[in-house]
Image (cartoon, rainbow, N blue to C red):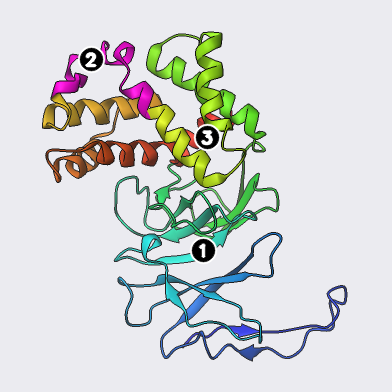
Amino acid sequence: MGDLYISFRRNKLDDFAWEAPQPINSLNSSADEFGPWGFEEEGTDKLTFFFNSNRPGGLGGFDIYSSILLADGTFSTPALVQELNSSANDTFPVVRRDGLEMFLISNRTTAGTVGGLDVWVSTRASTSAPWSTPVNLGPTINSTAAEGRPAISFDGTYMIFHSNRPGGSGGNDLYETRRRRLRSLIEAVSHFVRLHYLDFLNREPDEGGWAFWSAQILQCDGDAQCVDRKRLDVSRAFFYSGEFIARDARLAADLRGTRTYNEAFVEWCYRTYLQREPDSEGFNFWVGKLNSRLPSTDADYTEMIRAFIISAEYQARLAR
């Protein structure tokens, strides 16, 4: 069976000073463990260790677990990261330097799957918040072949992964994908609000409205959880505004909670946030999710708005 090992060195500048690897007995089991990734929270001594295992007690196949490095040099009992896992294989967790974004490899078959093993992404508002449901990075990154073992750069602007897709040198080849550097908070908020005016109201923002909605988010002073809540508040306000509702009679307030409203709501989530018509699989998935809790509530719509806001497809628009 595959086990996790660890090696130490006394001088981090000496590449030839590594000691003999030792098994991490507190993390290993009679099943397989692999895919380790450590995340050290900036400004603290807290190291969270992520890995995957097919030990009993998971959701099926390989699942992602986390453990904390304790003061005595041992690791805490591994905990299943429930929100990241599925009944399929979920492997190779890779966390961005700030701890707010994770990439993983999964062969789950939920909405968005491109091939067998794809690269998926999950985000969270803060390092103490739960991870979002992973979202497939789509056909720009994934193929109908198998992708694996992602690695993110220090600044989060490019990722390397391997794939056995056609067009390579044979077997698994390395590929690289890049994205723009994240904007400053003020620039990002300003861009976020402007897109809402363009996407929902088909017009440039008036100065007063732009300043008002931007201020709603900027008052958080960079607190990630507060920013996440305020962005949802702003987005929901545009979705429920009379100016936007006038575009489609099915969005009338007195229809909210019904199947008719839910279908319109999902259509407009695709049109506004992703700037495209919904694919049938995605449409049926999200409508079914809303209709499973009729009458749908404001909390259900807010949950879906958040899913679209943090989706890789929408984040790519924000980065442009």
Where residue 197 appears, x then y in whole percent? Answer: 45, 16
N-term mark: 3 or 2:
2
Please identify the quarter of the rendering in which residue 247 is found: top left
Q: Which secondary structure lies at badge 1?
A: strand
Where residue 178 appears, x then y in whole percent? Answer: 63, 42
Which residue is farthest front?
219
Residue at (27% x, 15% y) in the render:
245
Q: Where does label 3 land, which residue? A: 316
Q: Which secondary structure lies at badge 2?
A: loop
Residue at (29% x, 51% y) in the render:
110
On the rendered structure, is 228 left or right of 22? Answer: left
Identified by mark 3, the residue type is: Ala
The answer to whether residue 276 of the structure is visible from this angle is no
Q: Where does label 2 land, which residue? A: 248
Pointer 3 local density, CA inside 10 Å: few below 14, some 14–19, many at least 20: few
State the predominant SS element of the stretch in magenta.
helix
Pointer 1 local density, CA inside 10 Å: few below 14, some 14–19, many at least 20: many
The residue segment tinted magenta is 236-254
Q: Spatial distance from mark 2 to mark 1, Cα to Cα? A: 42 Å
N-term mark: 1 or 3:
1
Residue at (64% x, 29% y) in the render:
186
Mark 1 in CB contact with mark 3 (< 8 angstroms) = no
Q: Which secondary structure lies at badge 3?
A: helix
Q: Is residue 56 above or below residue 166?
A: below
Q: Where does label 1 land, which residue? A: 93
On the rendered structure, is 76 left or right of 307? Answer: right
